[in-house]
Image: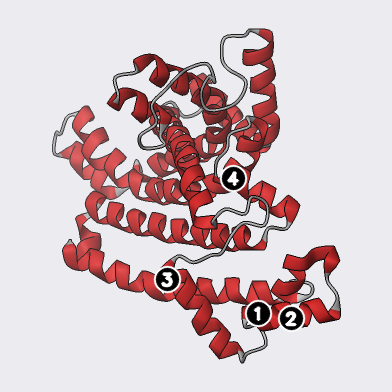
Amino acid sequence: MLRFLIRRLLQAVPTLLVLSILVFAWLRMLPGGPAGALLGDKATPQKLADLNHLLGLDQPIPVQYVKFLGRIITGDFGSSLISGDSVIAEIGRAFPATLELSIFALFLAVVFGIPLGYLAARHRGRLLDNATVLTTLVGVAVPVFFFGVLLKYVFAQKLGILPPSGRQDVTIDATHVTGFFVLDGILTGEFDAAWDALKHLILPGIALASIPFAVIVRITRASVLDVQQEDFVRTAESKGLTTPVIRRRHILRNALLPVSTTIGLQTGLLLAGAVLTEKVFNIPGVGYLLAQGIERRDFPRLQALLLLAAFVYVIVNLLVDVSYAIIDPRVRVR
C-alpha cells in the first residue's frame, strides 16, 4: 500500500506542474496582462511599463515562470487588492468555513445517497425506484442558488425554524480555536455554540448537497444493477451463501468502485457550488472570496484560489485512488 501511495504522489507532481503553467499562461492572457488587471481603469502606457518593470514582467518568459513557481512554493501570493491583507491569510481565515460546509454537504450526499441508490436498484421498476429517479432528475436540474433561495424562504422566513444566513448567531460569545465552529463548540464544551453552528449549516448544506446527492444516487443504482448480473454473483448464489452476505460482500462492495470515483469528482466540484451557496447564505468562505475577487478583479486573490482549487482536485483524485486499493485489492496488485 505504501508503494502504491508513493507512486500516486509522484504522479501528482507533473499534474501540479502543468496546472501552474496554465495559471501562469492565464495571467499573461488577461487584457493588458497582469499589470493591466492590477491597474484597471487607471492604466496608462507609462504606468503599465513601470508596473511591468516592478513586477519583473519585462523579463524573459522562462525567468518569469521560475520566479512565479518559486513564489508558489513559498506561499507568496501577494496582498489582496480589496482588503490589503495577505492572500494566504485571507484564505486561511475563510477556508475552514468552506471545508466545514463541504464536509457536511458531502456527508449528507453520501450517507443518504448510497443507501437510496442501493434500495432503488433492489426495487427496480417499483414505486421507490420511480420516485428516486424522479427526485434525482429534479436534484440535477434545479440550480444550487435557486434551491438555496427556496430553502431559505420556506424554512427561515416562512417557518422560522432555521437561521437564514451566516455561520453562527452573533449574540453567542463562542470560543474559536480551529475555525470549524461546530468542532470548536465541542472541543471547548460550548455545546450551545456547536448546536447553533450546526443549525446554520443545515440549509446551505442541503442546498450544496443537492447535486452530489442526485449524482451519487443515480451512479449507485446503475452500478448495483450492473453488478447484480455478473457471473460471480450467480456463483455465490449457487454456493448457498446467504442473501445478506451476497449483497454486502459481493454486490455492494464491487458496486462501490464507480461510486467512489463519483464521490471524488463531486468533492472537487463542491468548491464551484460553494461560490453560489456562500453568496446566498452570506457565509464568509473561499467561495465568497472567489465571487468577490471576480467582481472586483482581485488578481492576486484569484491566482491563489485557482491554484488552491487545482490542488484540491489533485488531492481528491489521490484519495480516490487510495479508496480503489482499499475496496478492491486487485488494484494494488496492478
Of labels 1 and 3, the one closer to you: 1
Q: Quadrant of residue 37?
A: bottom right
Q: Which residue is mark 1?
A: 54
Question: Helix, strand, or loop for circle 3?
Answer: helix
Q: Position of residue 281 (x, y in %)?
A: 63, 29
Q: Position of residue 152 (x, y in %)?
A: 65, 21
Question: Disc 4 or 2, which lies upstream in sequence?
Answer: 2
Question: Disc 3 or 4, which lies upstream in sequence?
Answer: 3
Q: Position of residue 103 (x, y in %)?
A: 42, 37
Question: Looking at numbered disc 1 in the image, what kind of residue is underneath it?
Answer: Leu
| Label drawn at residue 50 | 2
Is residue 140 at all visible to an observer of this figure?
A: no
Q: Tag 1: Cα neighbours inside 10 Å, few (<14), some, or many (≥20)?
A: few
Q: Which residue is mark 3?
A: 73
Q: Tag 3: Cα neighbours inside 10 Å, few (<14), some, or many (≥20)?
A: few
Distance Cα–Cα, label 3 vs label 2:
26 Å
Question: Helix, strand, or loop for circle 1?
Answer: helix
| Quarter occupied by the C terminus | bottom left
Question: Disc 4 or 1, which lies upstream in sequence?
Answer: 1
In screen coordinates, is 198 left or right of 1? Answer: right
Q: What residue sits 61% from the left and 92% below the top? A: 60
Question: Looking at numbered disc 2 in the image, what kind of residue is underneath it?
Answer: Asp
Distance Cα–Cα, label 4 vs label 1:
31 Å
Q: Quadrant of residue 305?
A: bottom right
Of labels 3 and 2, the one closer to you: 2
Question: Helix, strand, or loop for circle 4?
Answer: helix
In screen coordinates, is 149 left or right of 304? Answer: right
Q: Position of residue 310 (x, y in %)?
A: 50, 61
| Label drawn at residue 287 | 4
Question: Looking at numbered disc 4 in the image, what kind of residue is underneath it?
Answer: Gly
